[in-house]
Image (cartoon, rainbow, N blue to C red):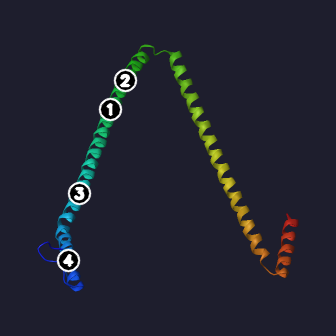
Amino acid sequence: MDEKEPNPRSARDALMIELIGDLGRVNDQITALPSDIKNAVEGSLRLIADAVEQTEKSAKEVLEKFQAEIKSSADNEADNFKQKMAINERTTMLSEKHHTKTHNLSVIMAFLVIFNTLFCGCMLGFLFYSQQKYEEKMENYADAYQIQQAAIANLPEKIQQQFEEEKRKLLSEK
């Protein structure tokens, strides 16, 4: 209520004064709404900006680590290649210095042993592969036989008996 006005004369005046006060509060809330929305949006945008910035930092760190790993790996591989080249050069020099019949014979024997080992490995691999194919084939035959038996079980009795008679004849001939 307003302090300037005297006490309301009737309930109607009191109600009008109260409604006008309520309208004033609603008006204040409506006028404050854009600033509230602005504050909420600014906060959300700050959070999004922080998240984007954090993501960019993380991506940059990952990229830097990845580049460092690649550089390290390249350096290691270059060093390994240099060492292998040096070993190869030394081996060649030693081979040329000690090129005798016994050395040639031992080299030939080493190659024969390696070749035989590789040949045996290939044969074992082929046998393993053949065995797997044979097992798959047998599984397929067993599956086909089970499917066939299930189909025969669904046939009428008369046809099932005819099938059994034909099967016995075929098996007795072999």
Q: CA distance from mark 2 to mark 3?
A: 59 Å
Left or right of 118 on screen, residue 155: right
Please tell me which of labels 2 and 1 falls first in the chain. 1
Please tell me which of labels 2 and 4 falls first in the chain. 4
Which residue is the site of mark 1? 72
Quadrant for the C terminus, please: bottom right
Mark 4 vs 1: CB contact within 8 A: no
Secondary structure of residue under mark 1: helix
Indicate which label's residue lies in the foreground, 2 or 4.
4
Q: Residue placed at 62% from the left, 36% from the top?
A: 120
Secondary structure of residue under mark 2: helix
Q: Amino acid at mark 1?
A: Ser
Q: Which sits in the foreground, 61 or 43?
A: 43
Indicate which label's residue lies in the foreground, 2 or 1.
1
Local crowd at mark 2 within 10 Å, few (<14), some, or many (≥20)?
A: few
Which residue is the site of mark 4? 23
Q: Position of residue 39 (x, y in %)?
A: 20, 60
Left or right of 76 on screen, residue 38: left
Q: Amino acid at mark 2?
A: Gln
Q: CA distance from mark 4 to mark 1?
A: 73 Å
Please tell me which of labels 4 and 3 falls first in the chain. 4
Tag on residue 43? 3
Q: Which sits in the foreground, 113 or 74?
A: 74
Please tell me which of labels 4 and 1 falls first in the chain. 4
Left or right of 73 on screen, residue 117: right
Q: Which sits in the foreground, 73 or 32?
A: 32
Q: CA distance from mark 2 to mark 4?
A: 89 Å
Tag on residue 83? 2
Secondary structure of residue under mark 4: helix
Local crowd at mark 3 within 10 Å, few (<14), some, or many (≥20)?
A: few
Q: Residue placed at 64% from the left, 41% from the top?
A: 124
